[in-house]
Image (cartoon, rainbow, N blue to C red):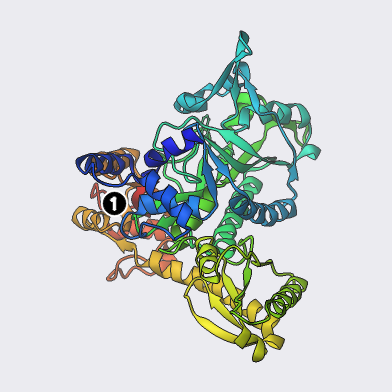
Amino acid sequence: MEATEAKAPMEATEAMAPVEAKKKEKKEKKKPSQVPVAAKKEGKKETGLGLTVKKGENFGEWYSEVVVMGDMIEYYDISGCYILLPWSYAIWESIQRFLDGEIKNLGVENAYFPLFVSERALVTEKKHVEGFAPEVAWVTKSGESALEVPIAIRPTSETVMYPIFAKRIRGHRDLPFKINQWCNVVRWEFKHPTPFIRSREFLWQEGHTAYATKEEADEEVYAVLDLYRRVYEELLAIPVIKGVKSEVEKFAGGLYTTTVEAFIPLTGRGIQGATSHCLGQNFAEMFDIVFEDEKRERKKVWQNSWGLTTRTIGVMIMVHGDDKGLVLPPRVAPVQVIIIPVPYKDVDTQKLFDAAASTARQLKAAGLRVKEDTRDNYSPGWKYSNWELKGVPLRVEIGPRDLANSQVRVVRRDTGAKEDVPMDKIVDRISELLEEIQLQLLEKARKERDDCIVKAYTWKEFMKALDDKKMVLAPWCDEEKVEEDVKARTKGESGAAKTLCMPLDQPDLPEGITIPRRWFSRLILSFFSGTKCFASEKPAKKWALWGRSY
Ligand code: 87F
């Protein structure tokens, strides 16, 4: 307990970039009279009031407060590790339910591989682990005695799984071979940790598949990418941009990396939502994963790997949360409707409680996730703000006047809109409202995101857009050196800009270009039309989305 409290002020700045956080620390040092964040928070908890910080005023602190006061996480005495409380774990379970079903529809089977990796297995793929080595955590002792050979904790499971791929894949009839596992992984991050967004242990699914041909592998890469888009858009109501990573940003061990990219308007940062990689034949070469084809020739398999993590929950909090707390999209909300009886002096409370119970019964029978808050040690007002803090999409209030009029009062969390609904229409109206909230959250987020995408053709336009906290869509020559150069030139207080992706959906070219499009692919057209890279002024090959990122 002590350790948790001691950590809170430090973690309060986590959602910021390290430099911003440092600046903040400095600022705080100048004002010793300020009440420490932890003390403020403890005080708040006792009184049960809402958030102390506004999202637009101090995003980092707002995020730290909302994850704790919204009952999503509890801090832990190891930096970068967090307890996922039932309220956030239930959201993860919703994501799992959907994605697990869809993954199985693709013919992928679940399995479980060990948490520990031998050093020998880990160095088999030396080349790709090299860059990640500092992040690998090792077990070196059991009790007081040193282990003969240290054992790594999986940061990802390629090295754990692929020896088994090599063993079990023999002939073409063994293909495709498709395995997924839901598990935890550990990456000893040194950047500032942020709950859900960047933690040292996190939950994910990792899919690993092997095919006889590149075409089949390619098809799956994009099928999975679309599932990831659906998790974000259909469940979490967050718009994402599908794209391919640049050579600098791709997973070095693979052939190409595809991604869904989300955006946090308030910080002006992009965030990688999930990735689906085509590994090509690199791992097949390293792990000797070969099969005999129809002509009895030995061939290397084509592999993919893909993963989606609990970061999803952090993105959802950042995008939808507001000054009152969490705003949960109905499809993932652990409780979709909270029913609160509102007793008055001298009025028969039992009747109110009966009406609340009957309303709950009807809604539950319709398959909705409903809870009644009948606690008598909290006022209705306290309960309203508490469930607002927790982001429940709809609140149903039942008071004596509602009872007399055979109606209930329904209040939306996202807009605050209130309406009276006749008791005999309650199931239909609530279902309709939940559907509406789900769609409107996505629409609102999409509009906000779209307002933050700016096209830039020149370095000046590019820098202006970055300074305005936008994502920048710019014609690019697609050269590694140029990307490194842009990184170096944009390095500042809030980190450097990099390519987020090359969107699959490439915008049209600038006006005034008259070559009939049907003659050339857009890519080649751009090359010939003389559109220049915004950074190098070499001929542009594609549009790339650039930005600062998490
Ligand atoms: C950290 C330490 C060691 C990322 C690491 O994206 C190794 C790694 O290989 C590492 N961090 N990666 C890349 C993971 C690639 C890939 N694995 C399966 C995924 C999706 C799921």
Of residues 520 and 119, the one nearer the viewer is 119
- Which residue does the numbered mark 1 point to in the structure image? 539
Image coords of residue 206 (percent x, y): 63, 41
In the image, residue 385 above or below residue 216: below
Residue 422 left/right relative to 325 = right
Is residue 444 visible to the viewer in this orientation of the structure? yes
- Residue at the far bottom in the pictured view: 405
Image coords of residue 410 (percent x, y): 58, 79
Image coords of residue 65 (percent x, y): 43, 52
Residue 436 left/right relative to 297 = left
Is residue 541 visible to the viewer in this orientation of the structure? no
Asked which quadrant contains residue 524, the reply is bottom left
Residue 53 left/right relative to 344 = left
Q: Where is ligand 1, by quadrant?
A: top right
- Residue at the far front in the pictured view: 346
Of residues 321 and 443, the one nearer the viewer is 321
In the image, residue 392 above or below residue 156: below
Asked which quadrant contains residue 354, the reply is bottom right
Of residues 171 and 79, the one nearer the viewer is 79
Mark 1: amino acid: Pro
Image coords of residue 72 (percent x, y): 55, 51
Q: Ligand 1 within 8 A of label 1's CB?
A: no
In the image, residue 54 above or below residue 76: below
- Residue at the far right in the pictured view: 173
